[in-house]
Image (cartoon, grey):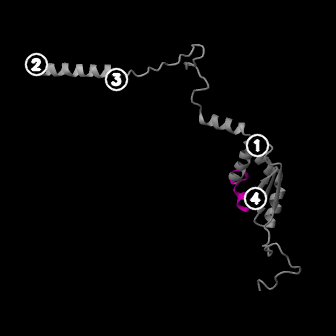
Amino acid sequence: MSGDEAGDDRGRRLVERARKAAPAAPRRRKRRVAPEDQRWSGAGADERDPALLGATVDKFVQDRDWEQPLRANGLLGRWEQIVGPAIAAHCRPERLTDGELVCVAESTTWAAAITLQTADILAKITTEVGPGVVRRLRVHGPTAPSWQHGPLRVRGRGPRDTYG
């Protein structure tokens, strides 16, 4: 026996003594699952498969009943695309509450012109956004600046000679 073989033999004996001296570690047994309870993944589709993002978001929106508010926000964001650049250049949507869309025109003339086109604009909105989002359109012209600040008011004509 050469020196290397004797060293290997001593190492084996040392490891063997350490194993015998060490306390036996408790062996954990895996809990067996009955075959009928095991959920195997097969080649067919099941609910654990990855889902498409669009379908998942659609289901999320439907579960929370957010369809109507999302369509309403889509109207405000795509205003120019829906009504066209000519109307969008002179009129902007201000708020949408309870099916009534309130728009502000840059002048009273434009407010009157857009009011005459209300039926066409409502038809475009229904086509683009969906039915029931906007049921009524109200357009008004620009408002004059308010000179009232704070909760208290003083009767009278208000400021005069302001622009003169």
Quadrant location, the C terminus:
bottom right
Residue assigned mark 4: 94
Label 2 sits on a secondary structure element that is loop
**What is the distance, in whole Å, between disc 2 and disc 1 at their CAs?**
91 Å
Residue assigned mark 1: 130
Would you say the residues marked 3 and 4 are in contact, meaning their CB atoms lie under 8 Å apart? no
* Residue at 63%, 35% in the rendered image: 56
Of pointers 3 and 4, the one earlier in the residue sequence = 3
Which mark lies nearer to you, 2 or 1?
A: 2
Residue assigned mark 3: 22
Given the image, on which type of amino acid does mark 4 rest?
Glu
Of pointers 3 and 2, the one earlier in the residue sequence = 2
**What is the distance, in whole Å, between disc 1 and disc 3 at their CAs?**
75 Å
Which mark lies nearer to you, 2 or 4?
A: 2
> Is the magenta region chiefly helix, strand or loop?
helix
**What is the distance, in whole Å, between disc 2 and disc 4 at their CAs?**
96 Å
* Residue at 27%, 22% in the rendered image: 15
Quadrant location, the N terminus:
top left
Q: Counting other residues with Cα less than 10 Å from the Cα at mark 3, is it few (<14), some (14-19), or many (20 or more)?
A: few
Residue 15, relative to residue 57: is it above or below?
above
Given the image, on which type of amino acid does mark 1 rest?
Gly
